[in-house]
Image (tube, rainbow, N blue to C red):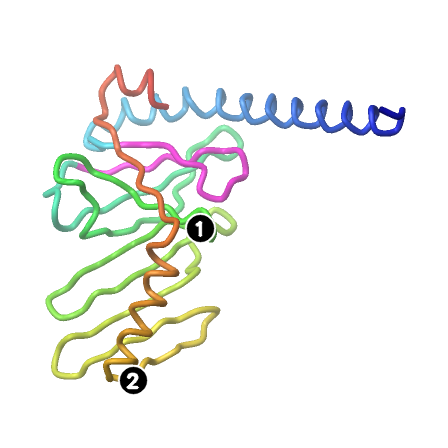
Amino acid sequence: MNKKRLLLICFIFCLNLIISISVQAATSKQTPIYNKFLQKNPSYTWFCTLDINKDGIKELIVSTNQTERFSNNYLIYTVKKGKMVYIGKIQHTLSTDGKNKAIFYNPKFKAIREIYQGAQTIEYNLYKISNSTFKEALYACEGHGHIKVYCIRKNGKFQDFPITTSGINSYKKSLKQYFYKGCKKYKLYKNTAQNRSSKL
């Protein structure tokens, strides 16, 4: 092994070590802030943490004790300069596994998935974080009422799919690719002292 290669390996190792230490330091600063926040807000009966935008700081996701199947509102917070910062809210009508609340995350887009099912429509969103607020990464909608609609919005531009068998199949293929493929499910935990100690 030549000297230059050895120096490069040492540099990469030291860089990874520095990044790991800085991430751990950021996490250790967040934990007591989130812990205190959850203790002060017992109405937030569910929580989990997730680094949505992959900046080394985990966001806090909380939810109240609502009906598990419908109207699941999730509030997302982060920490900036030692203070809690509210990012936004999502609603997910299909967000449980039958027993536990869950949040769905798309690592490719670094975005949280939202699905809202109404009487005649289903709307899909992927929200990413930009400047401590939510920004739409992708949107899709299908309407099953008198006027049928199948569309996807990406980068502010709509793509309407024809109301034909091939058009609907194409929409479903895009829907699967953007909103389901690679998505990961993260369980929310009950807001108890034991879970705050082990899960934050």
What amino acid type should be assigned to the residue bearing mark 2? Pro
Outermost right residue: 3
Give whichever of 179, 75 is nearer the camera.
179
Percent coordinates x, y for residue 171 in the rendering: 31, 72
The numbered mark at residue 181 is: none
Asked if 80 appears above or below 183 in the picture, the reply is above
Residue 193 located within the stretch drawn in magenta? no
In which quadrant of the rendered image does the N terminus lie? Answer: top right
Disc 2 or 1, which lies upstream in sequence?
1
Percent coordinates x, y for residue 90 in the rendering: 29, 51
Q: Is residue 185 left or right of residue 55?
A: left
Give whichever of 71, 95 is nearer the camera.
95
For image coordinates 72% across by 23% down, the residue present is: 14
What amino acid type should be assigned to the residue bearing mark 1? Thr
The numbered mark at residue 162 is: 2
For image coordinates 49% across by 20% down, the residue present is: 28
**Cβ–Cβ under 8 Å for marks 2 and 1:** no
Residue 59 located within the stretch drawn in magenta? yes
The numbered mark at residue 133 is: 1
